[in-house]
Amino acid sequence: MSQGWVRAERRRVLGVFPSVEYTLARAAAVHALREEARRTLYGPVPAAQVPARDAAVVALAAAARLRALGTARDRAAHTERLGN
């Protein structure tokens, strides 16, 4: 797949139906990005000093309610930092 982040494995279900299973090819990189986003949200750096790119990624992830940032309770505790 594009830039090698996701690997597509084609197979057949019941030997008849075509199917594609997607798996992460770079799981360690995804883990590192998740931890960086969590540090941006929960870390000690004031929100005004967070780089715009990192702030945008975290804001989008929070708006989409991605579990990668933590539980709903965790996100609710940081609504001010998210600008809600």
Image (cartoon, grey):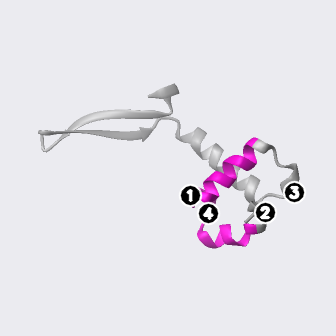
The percent position of residue 16, horizontal first and vertical second, equals 11, 39
Of badges 4 and 3, the one in the foreground is 3
SS state under label 4: loop
Q: Amino acid at mark 3?
A: Pro
Left or right: 23 as drawn, with respect to 4:
left
- Specify few, some or many for label 2: CA neighbours under 10 Å numbering under 14, 14-19, or 20 or more: some
Left or right: 14 as drawn, with respect to 7:
left
- Specify few, some or many for label 4: CA neighbours under 10 Å numbering under 14, 14-19, or 20 or more: some
**Farthest residue, direction front:** 84
Left or right: 49 as drawn, with respect to 36:
right
Task: Find disc 3 in the rendering and name its residue.
Answer: 46
Q: Earlier in the sequence, mark 4 or mark 3?
A: 3
**Could you tell me how far apart the alpha carbons at marks 2 and 3 are, in whole angstroms?**
9 Å
Vertical placement of residue 82 versus 77, above or below: above
**Could you tell me how far apart the alpha carbons at marks 4 and 3 are, in whole angstroms?**
19 Å
Please tell me which residue is depicted at 58% across the width and 43% down the height of the picture. Answer: 30
Q: Residue 53: name its quadrant.
A: top right
**Could you tell me how far apart the alpha carbons at marks 1 and 2 are, in whole angstroms?**
17 Å
Range of magenta residues? 53-79
Task: Find disc 2 in the rendering and name its residue.
Answer: 81
Magenta region, mostly helix, strand or loop?
helix
Q: Which mark is residue 70?
A: 4
- Specify few, some or many for label 1: CA neighbours under 10 Å numbering under 14, 14-19, or 20 or more: some
Q: Earlier in the sequence, mark 4 or mark 2?
A: 4
SS state under label 1: loop
Looking at the image, do the residues carrying marks 2 and 3 touch, with CB atoms under 8 Å apart? no
Q: Amino acid at mark 2?
A: Arg
Looking at the image, do the residues carrying marks 4 and 2 touch, with CB atoms under 8 Å apart? no
Q: Which mark is residue 66?
A: 1
The percent position of residue 45, horizontal first and vertical second, equals 86, 54
